[in-house]
Image (cartoon, grey):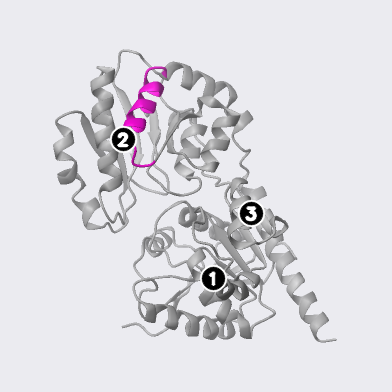
Amino acid sequence: MYPEGETRTSSHPIGQAVRPETKGIRVLHVLRGHRWGTIERESVRAIEWLQKTGVESFIYLDRYSPLDQALNKKNLGPTKLYPRQTLHTHWSGRLIFFFALRRLIKQHNIQLVHAYYIEDIVSVGMALRTFPEVPFVLSINHEIVKSYRKLWFKPFVARIDRFVVHNPEMMENVWSEMKIHPRKGLVIWPSPIEVDEDGASAPVSLTQEIVIGSYIPPLLRNMDGPQNLFTAIKVLQEKLQRPVRLKLFIDRNLSKSYFVEHLSTFSRPWAKSFTIEICEFDGLYPPFSSIHLWWTLSDEAIEDFSLLALKAHVPIMAPRMPSYIELKQKQPWVGELFKRNDIREMWANAYRVCDNLMDYHENLALSAKVFIPFWNQIGAQERLLKLYDKGIRLRKFLNARKGL
């Protein structure tokens, strides 16, 4: 067993000129890392950038989690803090989490806590009761389906100073389920890397096979999502009467669950109907070359892979959620939406895209910059730094007023 709060410190990367207002800010990122999705990938990129601005970052996460492995591979500078046991498997882990947070905030003189999972608001809120000068920032990238307006949640929700969401539609969801005013929120769209010319989709040909791409997370817990995808594509090929190839992208260097390790075995029954290709990739993002349609299985409010596909002029198939509905209202050629687990609607809408692939690609190429938010990584991180700075100054002001 490892001692509570064991650290691994590496040198800070050499960055650009340090901003006076952010120099020396000590931020604790509470990001357990047992998932691997948009919020984790964005945090890796954000922390890497924050390190260059003079912000001293500490990350409280599970050892050997996908996030831990990704940080080790990138050799980033933040200090890692590990719990004695995994943070999400047992109620005792939550109790240890609470006591460990209090000790770590005091031990490392933390000035701001940034949590990335809404399930952690109770533990973080309780830990911060003895640190009224420390602001609490929460990132949200999943639709809130559980009401946090109940009496026992109110003290912890009230402790949230600022929140960050990945699309404007989440603002209304946060207000309705948590009663946090939108003025406390900041919208930062996922800003994946820019697509090079070589990474753009190949020209669409009506005679070649249709290539559909999808991402399988490393810690897949069951095969329900991929099996629905396989079934829908099997019917799709029968209706199209054209060859279809499914490229399943998986991370090469991250530990994988049993289902991902044996993905080829689970997909074998469907491989008789259409071609299935399992593609391992390095880095945070898969390549989009020669992909004609991107099919997301993510339940996040907005997926960075889907946005990256649109930037590469590749239409998408996505669950019917507010963020994707908003994109489709602005530009119908982004692709099609479907009700989750509705096989009939999945293949029918995919057929609509595949039957008009050239139109989708041409319209995306013409108007992608109009309807897709203008991503500027530097600008987004500058706004996050201002959010941190504003939260710290406001906390100091409120504490000063209480002391009068």
Whether 351 is among the magenta residues is: yes
Q: What element carries label 2?
A: helix
Cα distance in 3D space between marks 1 and 3: 23 Å
Cα distance in 3D space between marks 1 and 2: 36 Å
Is residue 71 at least partly visible in the picture?
yes
Is residue 5 at least partly visible in the picture?
no
In contact (CB < 8 Å): disc 1 and disc 2: no
Q: What element carries label 1?
A: helix
Residue shown at 85% from the left, 86% from the top? 404
Q: For mark 1, what is the residue?
A: 121
18 to the left or right of 3: right
**Image position of 369 with respect to 119: above or below:** above
In primary-sequence order, the first of circles 1 and 2 is: 1
Query: What secondary structure is the magenta-colored segment mainly?
Result: helix
**Percent position (x, y) of residue 107?**
56, 85
Q: Nearer the viewer, residue 366 or 269?
A: 269
Q: For mark 2, what is the residue?
A: 343
**Percent position (x, y) of residue 184?**
70, 60
**Image position of 240 with respect to 85: above or below:** above
Q: For mark 3, what is the residue?
A: 381
The magenta-colored residue range is: 340-356
Pair 1/2: label in front: 2
Amino acid, disc 1: Ile
Amino acid, disc 2: Ile
Q: Which of 351 and 47 is in front in this view?
A: 351
Residue shown at 58% from the left, 31% from the top? 329
Pair 3/2: label in front: 2
In contact (CB < 8 Å): disc 3 and disc 2: no
Amino acid, disc 3: Gln
**Image position of 25 with respect to 102: above or below:** above
